[in-house]
Amino acid sequence: MFSVPTKTQYGIRALVHLARIDAASPGAPSESEASAGIAKAEGIPSRYLEGILAQLKAAGLVLSERGKHGGYRLAKPASEMRMIEIVEALEGEVKPVGCLDDSGVCAQGDCCLPRIFWVGLKEAIDGYLGSRTLRDVIEG
Amino acid sequence: MFSVPTKTQYGIRALVHLARIDAASPGAPSESEASAGIAKAEGIPSRYLEGILAQLKAAGLVLSERGKHGGYRLAKPASEMRMIEIVEALEGEVKPVGCLDDSGVCAQGDCCLPRIFWVGLKEAIDGYLGSRTLRDVIEG
DNA sequence: GTATATTCCTATTAAAACGATAGGAATACC
DNA sequence: GGTATTCCTATCGTTTTAATAGGAATATAC
Ligand code: FES
Ligand code: FES
């Protein structure tokens, strides 16, 4: 239950990889690493990771440079990148049930008890994801 | 992200339905309701719900009686039925990633930072689901 | 200015999970 | 015996997931 798609797992592994590069030389301007290099180091299918990084770039979480010596790097410090941003960039908002925002979808009418329960679950998940940054993750 | 399969949504709606019947006449021995009746009241495909209730019965959460006037009822008071039991009965343990228990699956070796993050997510979800009972849900 | 390494864009495919349906056997009540 | 129910097993269509493929655009190196 609640298994996380590989896309998100790979995306987070890639960002952790980039964050660790930055952490290795503090203060220095962050260095780009090519998609293929990350893929090899992390054991992720290379062409697949390209698409994932493109999505992270579209969300403003990484920056990219094309051409030789191009690659990706974090768009901001790991300490300012919340895990929920990453998850939402790759898979959209946490939404246990489709009727989260609607009211009166099911038989219970406008005050649906199960829906309140699912809203609580969303808050629990969002609370965890929102309380952790990429930096917290690379520090264990 | 983290959308809950209809099987689980339906299962919880059905149990909420049964719990509300019990709550309507406190003290009285709980009365069976037929699968088809629950399905109609809750707008759930009837034959599909049969399978779901069978699964809940196998997990010991509901009791069934066959034949005319048969049906389903809760196997124990709603206040003693934790939501995590229900979720696990229908979809198995909360397991964000396959490597939760294994060690050293990915490139990081025995101490994988992303894995620690996912373990934390599991604990957040389990914490929520384990802290609520069916009774909490029907009381809003 | 040509070769090379990279991101970028779009399409396709294979496999798995999901959601539901179907037929009919077993059982219990009346 | 007739009827209402649970129970068992199989099947099916759709959607999602995970990955692959081809090649265009772009920047550097020499
Ligand atoms: S409105 Fe979604 S379960 Fe009731
Ligand atoms: S062991 Fe699962 S991500 Fe590292």
Image (spheres, coloured by chain):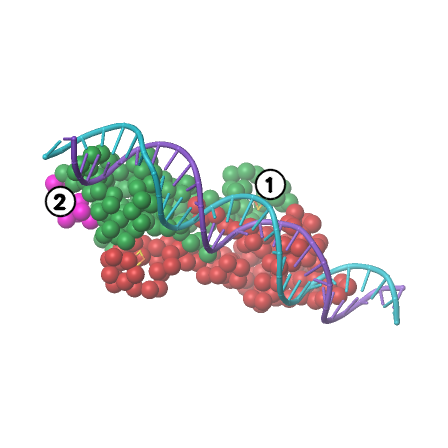
Chain colours: A red, B green, C cyan, D purple
Of residue A38 and residue A91, the one placed in the foreground of this image is: A91
Q: Is residue C19 above or below residue B89?
A: below
Q: Quadrant of residue A110?
A: bottom left
Disc ID at residue B26: 2
- Neighbour class for label 1 at 10 Å: few (<14), some, many (≥20)? some
> In the image, which residues are magenta?
B20-28
Q: Residue at x 28, y 42 (%)?
A: B81
Q: Residue at x 71, y 58 (%)?
A: A34
Q: Amino acid at mark 1?
A: Val
Disc ID at residue B105: 1
Q: Residue at x 12, y 40 (%)?
A: B28
Q: Amino acid at mark 2?
A: Pro
Instruction: Tell how many labels.
Output: 2
State if disc 2 and disc 1 touch (CB < 8 Å): no
Q: Tell which quarter ligand 2 is in.
A: top right
Looking at the rendered structure, the secondary structure element under dot 2 is loop
Q: Is residue B48 left or right of residue B74?
A: right
Residue B95: percent from left, percent from top: 46, 44
Asked if badges 1 and 2 are on one and the same chain, I answer yes
